[in-house]
């Protein structure tokens, strides 16, 4: 089974129904739900999702989103080691460096994101949602 970390932007595409990206991201969520791949989210993704969703749809719905995500995805922990390595990783965006290092430490096979340019330093496969869906 393939282990894939979902970048925060892909999760937000589904939760906030962001067109035109939501449909393909929802296909990937269904692949996780069907057990065709094991999905991971970085621990920081949960806090970011809650924060942004609470502003958009209210805190009750934001809590529901977090519960649904916890039921579907595994959590890639963000530890001190993850943060320290991310600081040295040479990524332009620290948040993406943290997600990458958390993914690396739990042994995922790939990351799915719409921000390919933010993962130039990655030493693992990085796919767009469309690329990953086509592979599956």
Image (cartoon, helix red, strand yellow):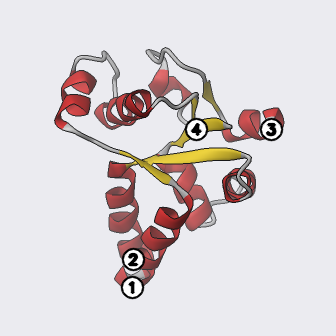
Characterize the local packing of mark 4: few (<14), some (14-19) or many (20 or more) Cα atoms within 10 angstroms. Answer: many
SS under mark 3: loop
Instruction: Give the Cα distance between marks 3 and 1.
Output: 34 Å
SS under mark 2: helix
Left or right of 31? Residue 83 is left
Residue nearest the observer in this picture, 48 or 78: 78
- In the depicted structure, whether residue 66 falls above or below residue 99: below
* Image position, residue 34 (x, y; %): 74, 57
Query: Quarter holding the C terminus?
Result: top right
Query: Quarter holding the N terminus?
Result: top right
* Image position, residue 16 (x, y; %): 56, 67
Give the mark toward the camera: 3 or 1: 3
Q: Name the residue under label 3.
A: 136
Disc number at residue 63? 2
Q: Name the residue under label 4.
A: 4
* Sequence-first tag of 4 and 3: 4
Quarter holding residue 61: bottom left
Mark 2 and mark 4 in contact (Cβ < 8 Å)? no
* Sequence-first tag of 4 and 1: 4
């Amino acid at each position: 089974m393939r282990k894939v970390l979902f970048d925060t932007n892909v999760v937000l595409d589904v939760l906030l129904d962001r067109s035109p990206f939501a449909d393909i991201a929802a296909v990937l969520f269904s692949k996780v739900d069907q057990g065709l791949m094991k999905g991971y989210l970085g621990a920081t993704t949960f806090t970011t999702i809650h924060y942004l969703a609470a502003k958009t749809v209210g805190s009750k719905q934001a809590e529901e989103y977090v519960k649904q995500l916890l039921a579907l995805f595994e959590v890639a922990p963000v530890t001190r080691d993850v943060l320290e390595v991310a600081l040295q990783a040479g990524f332009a965006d620290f948040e993406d460096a943290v997600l990458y290092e958390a993914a690396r430490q739990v042994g995922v096979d790939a990351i799915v994101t719409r921000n390919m340019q933010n993962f130039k330093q990655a030493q693992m496969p990085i796919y767009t949602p469309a690329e990953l869906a086509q592979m599956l």
